[in-house]
Amino acid sequence: MSMKEFDEIFASDLSEADKIAKGFHHIINTIIAHSQNEIELRKAMNDRETLVKEQIKLSTIKHARDIFDMAYMRATGKRSWNNE
């Protein structure tokens, strides 16, 4: 994720709620991609202990994303950026 992309989201014509949703998903997707890369690395290194920690972290991040999606849907009546 670049700060330029993040800044562009908040400088766009989107509604404030959509800016928050798109910015949130931009960050979350970057974290998920990094975590998936770490999981592959730990598998290749046969580092079971760290692998399990990364899998838990990934699951927690995805759960947080799902909670955000539910709250966004309830607040706006439409799907968040993640689901479009």
Image: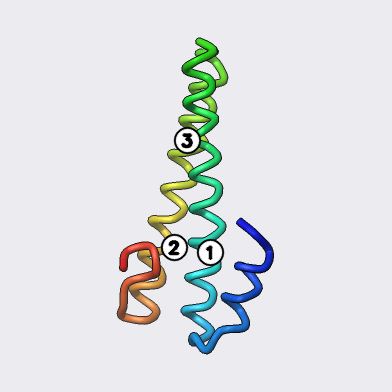
Task: Relative to 46, say whether 76 is above or below.
Answer: below
Task: Relative to 34, say whether 15 is above or below.
Answer: below
Residue at the spot of label 1: 24
Kindly indicate the quadrant of the structure image that contains residue 5.
bottom right
Q: CA distance from mark 1 to mark 2?
A: 9 Å
Q: Amino acid at mark 3?
A: Gln
**Within 10 Å of the Cα at label 3, are there few (<14), some (14-19), or many (20+) other Cα atoms?**
some
| Placement of the N terminus among the 4 image quadrants | bottom right
Tell whether label 1 touches label 3 (CB within 8 Å).
Answer: no
Tell whether label 2 touches label 3 (CB within 8 Å).
Answer: no
Disc 3, SS: helix
User: Where is residue 41 drawn, in percent x and y?
Assistant: 53, 23
> What residue appears at the point 55 percent right and 40 percent down from the top-left corner?
34
Lower position in the chain sequence, tag 3 or tag 1: 1
Residue at the spot of label 2: 68
> Which label is found at residue 36?
3
Q: Amino acid at mark 2?
A: Phe
Front residue of 74 and 78: 78
Q: CA distance from mark 3 to mark 1?
A: 18 Å
Tell whether label 2 touches label 1 (CB within 8 Å).
Answer: yes
| Placement of the C terminus among the 4 image quadrants | bottom left
